[in-house]
Image: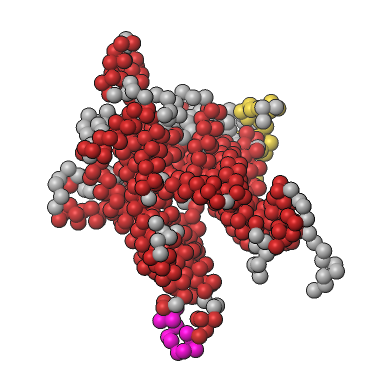
């Protein structure tokens, strides 16, 4: 190994180690994918989140078909799904769906569909993938109790669910760094008090505490307000873990020789913190933060699922899963579970990403 | 310890009382929906009747005083019965379920964790890792729902609840106890999966660190069989960080129990708490949150005692009075 050619800086070194962590890198790619989905929900979803069709209540998922037979029995390539013919059994009140081979719904890319406003800036009506005829509807994930497309709703929910994790963690991080930093930097009596407070907060079971706080949000509150209140509630517990990590790192570094040297050189405390201490635990903090996001996502999902988190018309994965709350609806429409897979995928990839970052940031890893 | 208990009582009370809106507001709102309108003085009378007209601090002091001197946890507005009557049995069931889940996690996770560390990268290790990922990523309530669906779809029975219908209101008997046991396993698995996954990961990682220490080599050179050796030395070491995280695990179980109980329709504290919170049933909700937190604190105490049993260094600290 030649050292002369290899004067890579710290970031490059971490990146190289990270690339070797296969699961971590996979999680990284997938996390980027999910956040891209969150950024372009309106364009990616075939339909808007609220358009419905009463005739398609609980329509099962449709699968994409590739070839169409014409009259001369020639098969031509054409992306399509088959529409449903529905029959209502008036005795049981149940509706059964049968695929109708004559109802061909053609699919295409970059098609015109429901109008939307991307990021509140551009009016547009193109969708990445969907039925070519504007009035047709497709259900790759089936339809819910009002005849809304579950796939479109899952995609729309991505934005709320994924950002609530980010915002919640950002809030926790600000609190955690401030309080943990104070605790670690001053030590002594202040440190003892703060640590006790954290211990007590952590000894209270979080879900009862969360639902206690979330139940106090009035149902009439505007969606945006509910959204921020929920993130605040989640970070009330969330900051404690981060504060502990920050404090631990501060404590460990405070007595290191190079920090002493920096102090003897006459650096001011703030400069010591930002120039010498922060780079040393930044990668660790990033990893811990990444690992904290999935917890937030699950917490939000659980609260909304119980009906005391976010509420319609806001859609998050938890709000969607609320539809699958009782045995009756999941036995008629098992596809209502599908938003749950989005939760699992998001949580897994963020966990892998966090694990990878932590391993990559650890200089003693061989 | 005493400070913790005190802070918990404060937190559990003020979480419920401080946010705007109380039980009387709910009554008024409901009455409005039926077209009834309350007069100002009627509302004031109602508040006085429920004792909600005093300041938050006064209400807290009265509540605390009654608990301390008369063992009275207040009155449930929504149910019209004393809180203690409502929660005693449910609290017992919650405790049972939490402790059983904790046992389940130990019994399952410790051997699997040891196995997957000793036989690293074996088929069993990969299987354990897979279970670990599932436990990590699938929220409790989703797992409960999926189990509900599977058992309904493929076994044609509903698995909800902790008792069969005929035992729900029956007095305690041996048959009822057996019935409880036969229903307990589903919530136990649902609640335990996440913890099991975590413990397997932790024990595996800890044990892998220990297995290459020189003292293991020494023991091996002494001629101990591999099984004896692993269990006698490195496992004991690797259990240490796990036991100190035990309280965390127990708190998580209690916390998760709330939501799983709602999904599975268990007669534990979870559904009662949720309903009490939605109805702003002040004393019921506060007492429930308080007791759940006490349970968690007891778990912490228990884990500290376990740690003392396991680790002689901590025993010595305790003797010298540092733990108090």
Across and down, in percent, residue B73 comes to: 26, 36
Viewer can see residue A353: no
Name the residue at 36% across, 68% down: B309
Residue A264 lies, with reference to residue A321, above or below; the image says: below
Quarter placement of the C terminus of chain B: bottom left
Name the residue at 34% across, 28% down: B58
Name the residue at 70% across, 27% down: A121
Name the residue at 65% across, 56% down: A254
- Image position of A68 (left or right of B25): right
- Quarter-wise, where is residue A119 in the image? top right
- Image position of A330 (left or right of A81): left
Q: Which residues are magenta?
A: B219-230
Viewer can see residue B100: yes
Colouring convention used in this rendered image of the protein: secondary structure
Q: Determine if the magenta segment contains residue A231.
A: no
- Quarter-wise, where is residue A112 in the image? top right
Q: Determine if the magenta segment contains residue B222.
A: yes
Query: Which residue is at the front of the view, A227 or A266?
Result: A266
Count of picture labels: 0
Across and down, in percent, residue A245 comes to: 57, 53
Query: Which residue is at the front of the view, B108 or A322?
Result: B108
């Amino acid at each position: 190994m030649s050292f002369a050619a290899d004067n890579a800086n710290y970031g490059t070194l971490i990146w190289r180690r990270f690339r070797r962590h296969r699961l971590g890198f996979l999680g990284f790619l997938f996390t980027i994918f999910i956040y891209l989905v969150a950024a372009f929900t309106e364009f990616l979803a075939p339909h808007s989140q609220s358009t419905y069709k009463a005739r398609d209540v609980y329509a099962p998922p449709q699968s994409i078909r590739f070839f169409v037979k014409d009259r001369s029995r020639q098969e031509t390539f054409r992306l399509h799904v088959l529409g449903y013919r529905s029959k209502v059994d008036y005795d049981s009140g149940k509706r059964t769906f049968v695929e109708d081979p004559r109802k061909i719904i053609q699919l295409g890319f970059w098609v015109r569909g429901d109008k939307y406003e991307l990021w509140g800036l551009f009016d547009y009506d193109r969708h990445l993938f969907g039925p070519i005829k504007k009035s047709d509807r497709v259900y790759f994930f089936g339809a819910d109790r009002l005849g809304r497309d579950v796939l479109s709703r899952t995609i729309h929910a991505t934005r709320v669910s994924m950002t609530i994790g980010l915002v919640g963690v950002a809030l926790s991080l600000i609190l955690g760094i401030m309080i943990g930093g104070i605790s670690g930097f001053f030590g002594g009596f202040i440190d003892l008090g703060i640590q006790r407070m954290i211990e007590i907060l952590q000894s209270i079971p979080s879900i009862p505490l969360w639902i206690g706080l979330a139940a106090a949000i009035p149902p009439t509150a505007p969606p945006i307000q509910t959204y921020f209140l929920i993130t605040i509630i989640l970070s009330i517990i969330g900051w404690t873990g981060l504060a502990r990590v920050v404090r631990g790192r501060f404590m460990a570094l405070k007595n290191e020789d190079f920090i002493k040297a920096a102090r003897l050189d006459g650096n001011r405390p703030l400069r010591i913190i930002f120039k010498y201490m922060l780079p040393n635990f930044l990668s660790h903090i990033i990893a811990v933060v990444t690992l904290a996001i999935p917890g937030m996502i699950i917490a939000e999902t659980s609260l909304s699922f119980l009906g005391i988190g976010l509420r319609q018309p806001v859609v998050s994965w938890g709000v969607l899963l609320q539809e699958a709350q009782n045995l009756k609806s999941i036995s008629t429409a098992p596809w209502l579970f599908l938003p749950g897979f989005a939760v699992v995928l998001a949580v897994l990839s963020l966990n892998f990403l966090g694990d990878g970052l932590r391993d990559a940031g650890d200089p003693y890893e061989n | 310890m005493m400070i913790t208990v005190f802070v918990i009582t404060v937190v559990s009370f003020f979480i419920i009382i401080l946010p705007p809106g109380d039980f009387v507001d709910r009554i008024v709102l409901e009455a409005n929906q039926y077209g009834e309108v309350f007069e100002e003085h009627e509302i004031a009378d109602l508040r006085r009747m429920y004792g909600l007209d005093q300041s938050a601090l006064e209400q807290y002091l009265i509540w605390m005083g009654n608990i301390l001197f008369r063992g009275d946890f207040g009155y449930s507005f929504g149910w019209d019965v004393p809180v203690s009557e409502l929660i005693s049995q449910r609290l017992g069931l919650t405790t049972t379920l939490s402790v059983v889940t904790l046992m389940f996690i130990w019994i399952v996770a410790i051997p699997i964790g040891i196995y997957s560390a000793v036989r690293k990268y074996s088929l069993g290790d990969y299987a354990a890792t897979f279970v670990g990922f599932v436990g990590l990523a699938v929220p409790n309530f989703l797992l409960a729902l999926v189990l509900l669906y599977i058992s309904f779809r493929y076994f044609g029975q509903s698995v909800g609840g902790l008792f069969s219908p005929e035992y729900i209101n029956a007095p305690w008997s041996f048959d009822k106890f057996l019935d409880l046991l036969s229903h307990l396993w589903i919530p136990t698995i649902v609640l335990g999966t996440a913890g099991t996954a975590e413990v397997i990961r932790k024990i595996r990682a800890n044990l892998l660190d220990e297995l290459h220490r020189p003292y293991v080599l020494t023991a091996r050179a002494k001629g101990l069989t591999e099984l004896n050796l692993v269990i006698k030395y490195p496992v004991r070491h690797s259990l240490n960080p796990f036991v100190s995280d035990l309280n965390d695990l127990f708190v998580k179980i209690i916390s998760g129990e709330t939501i799983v109980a709602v999904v599975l329709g268990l007669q534990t504290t979870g559904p009662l708490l949720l309903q009490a919170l939605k109805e702003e049933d002040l004393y019921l909700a506060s007492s429930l949150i308080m007791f759940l937190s006490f349970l968690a604190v007891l778990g912490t105490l228990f884990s500290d005692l376990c740690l003392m049993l396991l680790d002689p260094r901590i025993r010595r600290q305790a003797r010298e009075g540092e733990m108090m």
